[in-house]
Amino acid sequence: MNRRKFCSSLTGLAALAATPSLVQSKTLQTQDTALPQTSAGKKAQTMTCDIPRSWRRAGLIIQRGMGGPGSSVVGDPCIVRDEDIGGWRMFLFFEPPGCGQAICPHGLEPGPGHWKLEGPLVFTNPQQVSGGSTQKPYVVMDAHRPNHPAKIDGQYRLLSVSWQDGHKVVQQSVADKLAGPWTVKPEPLIVNGGPGDFDSKHVDAVTGFHFPERNEILYFYMGYPEKAQSRRISPFGNAQAVAVQRVGESTVRKLGEILPPCQTAGHWASGWVGGLQILPGRNHRWIAIINASPTAPRHGDKEVFSEEPPPSLGGFAYCDEEWPVRGWQWCPQPIEWIENVPAQAQALGEGTNLWRQHILVLPDGRMSLYYNSGYYGKEQLYCKIAEGKNVHLR
């Protein structure tokens, strides 16, 4: 069993304002070598991002429900600009049923009290969802423009995680508008690997980024092994991997692991590795926000957290390759250790885990971090704001 099957209930289903509290993160060590910037193939402003060194809490963004839709998990956010509403649209792991959405309409600041929960996603052909349910939706984005959805061949593409023969697989849906409805493609986009592979059990927590200058899409995903991998530390730990697809082709080619559990004992990512979002970097060609854990899974453990033992932490990795399919390195410290979560944040439900991390880059250069926190199956959505100037336009 894992956290995604563990259900419970708490309080009302709504976007909720919360009293902010302040927190300073541990300083993250980065290199300061300036690198050439990657453009999107157009003569336009190039956006690059630094790894923020400190954050302040904004509070609770969306609360779980007392029952019904969204009563177990509200989290794993993916936020994109929706020009049809002149605002922002958030796709959520919204359990039950699995996929939901919220909007921050035109004229409102995307923070506490300004997100309107719209409920589950609508699919035109739900009978094509493998295994009967799908979760953790993620819209394919323009790799060079954070939080901007890629419209490819006139359609948006939505990735989600479904079930097939007891294994998690990735499915794809398409729509003309971000509001949907979404049409599911019945054949899985990415399936689990073969016996002994690092992803033989599940592929999970998928993200997607379109590189228009290459006419290709990179998919990043978690791979769960069924058998021990050849690692000294955490042989059963999940790894972050990448796959590539050329636009117009149906085949997706796996390129292998890019961030397995760190092989430094006690490192915040030495146990297992979760979902990843890439952003164009300034001091590094690419940076990525990612969640991971220092705790290695124990083979045969039957606890609810057997595959992802606590704590889940958020932090960064970086890559200096133009094509970010190799060369990824971990930052030495997470954004925050669980023991440093202040009492005021704990009173609002934070603790045990800081799950899937997602950055929203605003047009004025501010950067916010969205993440779900709480015990397994009791997760709600929270936000931190980066302090200082971390986004640069040229």
Image: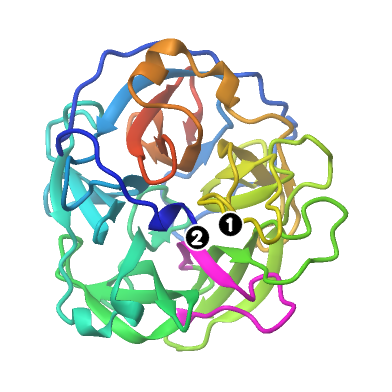
The image shows residue 30 at horizontal and vertical percentages of 72, 30
Residue drawn at point x = 74 percent, y = 71 percent: 227
The image shows residue 288 at horizontal and vertical percentages of 58, 45
Question: Dot 2, crowdedness within 10 Å: few (<14), some or many (≥20)?
Answer: few
Amino acid found under the numbered disc labelled 2: Met
Q: Could you say whether the residue bearing mark 2 is in a helix, strand or loop? A: loop
Range of the magenta residues? 189-212
Examine the rendering and report whether any part of residue 392 can be seen: yes
Question: Dot 1, crowdedness within 10 Å: few (<14), some or many (≥20)?
Answer: few
- Image position of 193 with respect to 276: above or below: below
The residue beneath circle 1 is 302
In the image, taking residue 97 as reference, residue 377 lies left or right, namely right
**Between 239 and 44, the one nearer to me in the picture:** 239
**Between 253 and 59, the one nearer to me in the picture:** 59
Q: Quadrant of residue 268?
A: top right
Cα gap from disc 1 to disc 2, whole angstroms: 7 Å
Residue drawn at point x = 16 percent, y = 31 percent: 114
Q: Quadrant of residue 20?
A: top left
Residue drawn at point x = 51 percent, y = 88 percent: 251
The reply to whether dot 1 and dot 2 touch (C-beta < 8 Å) is yes
Labels 1 and 2: the sequence-earlier one: 2
Q: Does residue 146 belong to the magenta stretch?
A: no
Q: Which mark is residue 167?
A: none
Amino acid found under the numbered disc labelled 1: Lys
